[in-house]
Amino acid sequence: MMHQSLLMWTGDVGENRMVTAQGLIISGNTAFANSGFRQKVQSVQVLEALLPEGIIIPTGFETVGHIAHLNLRDEHLPYKKLIAQVVLDKNKPKIQTVVNKTDAIQNDYRTMQLEVLAGNDSLRTMVIESGLRFQVDLGAVYWNSRLATERQRLINNIFRDSDVVCDMFSGVGPLAISAAKKVKYVYANDINPTAVEYLERNMVLNKLERKIEVFNMDARRFISSIYSSQHVHPVTQIVMNLPNDAAEFLGGYFQIPFRTSTFARVLRILEDRGILRNSQSGLRYVMPMIHVYGFSKAEDPEHDFNEYLRLKLQRINVALGENVDSVEMHRVRLVAPGKWMICASFTLPESVAIAQPNYISC
Ligand SMILES: C[S@@+](CC[C@H](N)C(=O)[O-])C[C@H]1O[C@@H](n2cnc3c(N)ncnc32)[C@H](O)[C@@H]1O
């Protein structure tokens, strides 16, 4: 029910129009200030006038290209179309579609369950990030503009021009493609075939296809195949952005790639023939830096995530802290009140990489 004390029908502003006690004229879902010239007012004011008293006014939304993405509370659901229409009307022409997330992200592809509430039905859009263009189908792939700062942190502060980056969970390529502008080479992988399709399109769109090789497989297989193939680029940075589960994938590459890969075998043959010196006498295998993401609700999220990683790594006989010189923790962002997304970065020690495996496979 509308807030009756705020709204009353009036004859002088025309049919199907209401005027509020604050002097707003509501026509359909558009509101104007009733002040000589008709000045458009903010959607918050419109919603304050239209929604029942006592309801928290939904104020913010995320944008992904032309799509406004709402995260409505249960109490808003009876008014979802009205809210969406106001958001659409007040943010045209930039916003053409308004959606609401209907369920928490639960599936392997990390896609959102979305309901189109207003505007056109297309969830295909174009996002511009750091001067690059990304085509995204929000119904079929993962995208989060809020990670843009974190991507730039890695690229600007950590990656060097000479780096070879391995993005194990690349999505449509916001990190992989952006990194490819700077680094020597990128290997990008995602298990979602649609994400990979968009990744390939986006590489071409940004003219970076020559610097990226794409894979569409489970991350464990991907990392093994990178190291066991004839690839000439030794990986120097590995990014694992699958915050709920990434640590589960750590066991997938610690020993396997270095111990059984063609690359390692070739190195060993070269060592045996005296073409290369062995590690004792100076040969350095290239040990990648690993950036693994996770969430923590603890008071000390860095300590909590460190402990979590330590437990995970103990399963593969690697004691983080004993074997890893230093783990750098970075708070990425608050994803919910009291819940941090954290990035742990550490260099994989040679002793760990070439150790005999003694673990239960994840
Ligand atoms: C949190 S998203 C990150 C995507 C991308 N890095 C970004 O920032 O947009 C995680 C991605 O991992 C992919 N994924 C989930 N499980 C996977 C697996 N086992 N192997 C490879 N990719 C996986 C999903 O399809 C999804 O695109």
Image (tube, rainbow, N blue to C red):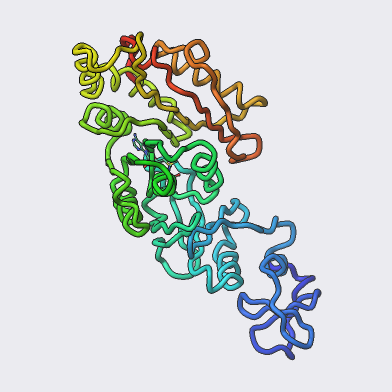
Residue ID at (31%, 30%) = 223
Residue ID at (34%, 49%) = 195
Left/right placement of residue 321 relative to residue 2 reads left
x then y, percent, for residue 219: 32, 33
Residue ID at (80%, 74%) = 22
Report the front residue among 105 and 351: 351
Report the front residue among 247 and 253: 253
Specify the quadrant that holds the N terminus: bottom right
Report the front residue among 291 and 299: 291
x then y, percent, for residue 293: 49, 32
Left/right placement of residue 46 relative to residue 184 reads right
Is residue 221 positioned above or below 359 on the image? below
Image quadrant assignment for residue 233: top left
Image quadrant assignment for residue 297: top right
Q: For ligand 1, give the image quadrant.
A: top left
Specify the quadrant that holds the C terminus: top left
